[in-house]
């Protein structure tokens, strides 16, 4: 764990789950304003396709811009199911499409 991550205060797990559930609901509804409210104004969205799928080549900066991209992607790649899971000790959204996992989105500093 990095020093920056250790120093960042973290809300109790129940609160993080509540925020992540609200984030999932806003994402599923394509609620741009709802996503913007939930994202920090300085949010950064990092994508990595692992060389197997297309991903943004540059970091996406700013809560409003991140929300726009997420809504656009949700319309293009409508998931069949979104689960809240734990990845590396952190909560994440696991996106399923056509019976396969196609994305894992981890939100830090909830």
Image: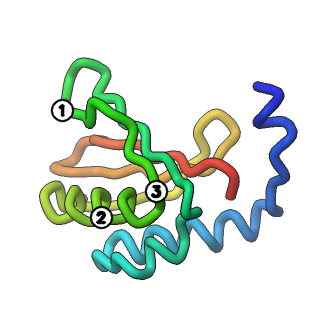
Mark 2: secondary structure: helix
* Residue at 40 percent of width and 66 percent of height: 64
Foreground: 45 or 13?
Answer: 45
Q: Is residue 57 above or below residue 60?
A: above
* Residue 15 shown left or right of residue 27 in the figure: right
* Residue at 44 percent of width and 72 percent of height: 35
* Residue 77 shown left or right of residue 17 in the figure: left
How far apart are labels 3 and 1 at the CA level?
Answer: 21 Å
| x, y percent for residue 34 | 44, 80
Q: Which residue is mark 2?
A: 68
Quadrant of the rendered image containing residue 21: bottom right
Foreground: 69 or 97?
Answer: 69
Q: Which residue is mark 1?
A: 54
* Residue at 84 percent of width and 36 percent of height: 6
Mark 1: secondary structure: loop
Mark 3: secondary structure: loop
| x, y percent for residue 12 | 82, 62
Q: Which mark is residue 38?
A: none
How far apart are labels 2 and 3 at the CA level?
Answer: 10 Å
| x, y percent for residue 75 | 16, 65
Q: Which residue is mark 3?
A: 62
Mark 2 / mark 3, whichever is N-terminal: 3
* Residue at 47 percent of width and 62 percent of height: 63
Please identify the quadrant where the N terminus is shown: top right
Please identify the quadrant where the C terminus is shown: bottom right
């Amino acid at each position: 764990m990095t020093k920056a991550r250790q120093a960042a205060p973290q809300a109790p797990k129940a609160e993080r789950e509540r925020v992540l559930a609200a984030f999932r609901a806003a994402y599923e509804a394509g609620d741009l304003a709802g996503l913007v409210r939930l994202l920090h104004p300085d949010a950064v969205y990092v994508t990595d396709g692992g060389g197997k799928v297309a991903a943004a080549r540059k970091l996406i900066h700013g809560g409003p811009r991140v929300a726009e991209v997420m809504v656009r992607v949700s319309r293009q790649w409508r998931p069949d199911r979104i689960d809240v899971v734990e990845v590396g000790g952190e909560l994440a959204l696991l996106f399923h499409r056509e019976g396969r996992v196609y994305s894992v989105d981890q939100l830090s500093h909830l």
